Amino acid sequence: QLQLQESGPGQVKPSETLSLTCTVSGDSVNNTSYYWGWIRQSPGKDLEWIGNIYYDGRTSYNPALKSRVTISLDTSKNQISLKVTSVTAAETAVYFCARQVVVVMSPRYFDLWGRGTLVAVSS
Amino acid sequence: DIVMTQFPLSQPVTPGEPASISCRSSQSLLHINGYNYVDWYLQKPGQSPQLLIYLRSNRASGVPDRFSGSGSGTDFTLKISRVEAEDVGTYYCMQSLQTPYTFGQGTKLEIK
């Protein structure tokens, strides 16, 4: 069954590193038709794109977060990872991973989303 | 960054009646290749967003034909021809013309 499943700690202390994993089932992270992305949704409900990665390791990040974000692939486990360093309480959110369809050689719309995982940044 | 502005932010609708949601972008989403890079998502209560419409007017797999997308450049519209109870939730437009991809604030569709 095609699905994405996020996992990781539900709570992170301020100034520490948030680490999440997305496990892909029913598809391969090596599929050249897709990028794999992370999006978060704050309690205020705004959706914010964090970044994405292609099968060859190419990444793109939101400039607002760029210096603190790393997205990587583990092809042996068919997983995508997200790390955000030096987090603050304002980064408490539901974190989604999503599959992004390539159109004319660039990633465009998100056709499949995980259920999301809530991460609270709190001491 | 491209700013996406939706209106209205809330829309009460009677089942069987039509509904329309507008989305305006701060710059044109029309690429030289002819695609308008705007998509629509529905987030039902307690769920993750799901793709409804991609590239302005293409319905995603399994989306009923009562949903349609239109517009060009900076002004886009999502229309529901006859609202059903299962359509409740928050609708978001998103631009994928350039990074960072950005979303509208969301429009909450409620049943009267």
Image (tube, coloured by chain):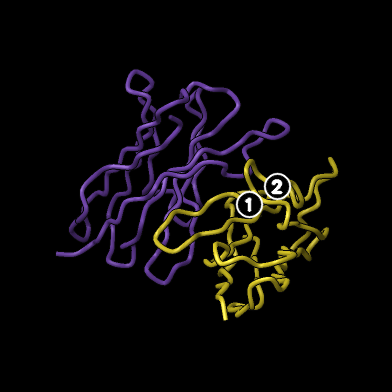
Q: Which chain is purple?
A: A
Q: Nearer the viewer, residue B56 or A54?
A: B56
Percent position (x, y) of residue B46?
39, 61
Q: Colour of chain B?
A: yellow
Percent position (x, y) of residue A23?
35, 33
Q: Is residue A10 above or below residue A58?
A: below
Circle 1 is placed at which residue position? B52
Dot 1 alpha-carbon crowd within 10 angstroms: few under 14, some 14 to 19, many 20 or more:
many
B100 lies left or right of A42: right
| Residue drawn 70% across the image and 53% down it | B38
- Disc 1 to disc 2, how far (Cα)? 6 Å
Q: Residue furthest front?
A: B16
Percent position (x, y) of residue A81?
35, 36
Dot 2 alpha-carbon crowd within 10 angstroms: few under 14, some 14 to 19, many 20 or more:
many
Circles 1 and 2 in contact, beta carbons < 8 Å: yes
Q: Answer with mark 1 or mark 2, whichever residue precedes in sequence.
A: 1
Look at the numbered disc 1 and give the secondary structure of its residue.
strand
The kind of residue tagged 1 is: Leu
Circle 2 is placed at which residue position? B59
The kind of residue tagged 2 is: Arg
Q: Quadrant for residue A80, please give it.
A: top left
B32 lies left or right of A41: right
Q: Is residue B12 above or below residue A60?
A: below
